[in-house]
Amino acid sequence: MTDQQQSARCPALFLAAPSSGAGKTTITAALARNFRQQGKVVRVFKTGPDYLDPQILAQASGQPVEQLDMWMAGEAYCQQKLYEAALEADLILVEGVMGMFDGEPSSADLAARFNIPMAIVMDVKGMAQTAAAVALGLANFRDDISVAGLIANSCGTERHAQLIRDALPPELPLLATLPRDPDVALPERHLGLVQADEVRDELEIRFNRGAEWIAGNAITELPSEVEFVSAEVEAVEPLLSGKRIGVAKDAAFSFIYDANLRMLTEMGAEYQFFSPLTDSELPEVDAL
């Protein structure tokens, strides 16, 4: 850390999994809602260029959700966003993408770079001691990551949980067991989660049910603190000063990143939303 950099400490946990479909978003949302109900400020981040999961997680946490992608945005951007979150949050949660070692950079790369302990989320339906073996293999695959333990999703009974718990070594504890509950699982369609605006009321019911899960079966205390250091980020030049930008936004046009809108503003532009579905004419703008 240089003399110009500052640091902030905040409890943090990185939720990763062996593959997609393990329940990362469901559990991240449930954790966020549980700690939010305790009066905590929870900042959630999503790994990779995903715009659906952040909508869900923002509603669950009541806070804006940033995407962290070291390839698209760079290490300095990710570092600064984590630092800014640590200044205001009581807890930082990061949801991984795909399997924890998939992609370049992967979820594990991001966790290793910022020293965030990982929790392995695994759907344990149809296995018991094997879940411990898989978790142990993931935890020891690389020596630059720290794994806090296993979260066993879709765990059938206490006996099921005990078999997994007994098979795990002391250094890799069973952090939580969550039951098979269709009332908590987030609604999906074939290419991913349903957009939050489509099912907002239904999501509230599922978030609150998930928070009940957490309170009774899972992580109820804040994880260990992580030190986050500010980054030296170049100032944005006002290259769009005085320009007006039209941004398509409606039920069909919703693939929008808040970071891109902020960048337009930082570059000096004003933006105005319009709807290709319902508007009869375009707004008075310099670009679309």
Image (cartoon, helix red, strand yellow):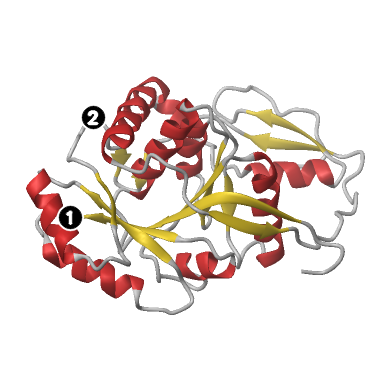
Q: Identify the residue under disc 1.
A: 124
Q: CA distance from mark 1 to mark 2?
A: 18 Å
**Secondary-structure class at tag 1:** loop
Q: Quadrant of the N terminus?
A: bottom right
Tell me which corner region of the image, top left, top right, bottom left or bottom right, holds residue 137: bottom left
Judge the density around disc 2: few (<14), some (14-19), many (≥20) Cα neighbours within 10 Å. Answer: some
Q: Nearer the viewer, residue 50 or 183?
A: 183
Give me the residue at 68% from left, 30% from top: 273
Give me the residue at 30% from left, 27% from top: 209
How far from the left and from the top, in percent, is residue 25? 38, 45
Q: Up-down: is 162 above or below 196? A: below
**Secondary-structure class at tag 2:** loop
Q: Nearer the viewer, mark 1 or mark 2?
A: 1
Looking at the rendered structure, the number of numbered marks drawn on it comes to: 2
How far from the left and from the top, in percent, is residue 109? 51, 71
Q: Up-down: is 81 above or below 33? A: below
Q: Identify the residue under disc 2.
A: 183
Residue type at tag 2: Asp
Residue type at tag 1: Val
| Mark 1 or mark 2, earlier in chain | 1
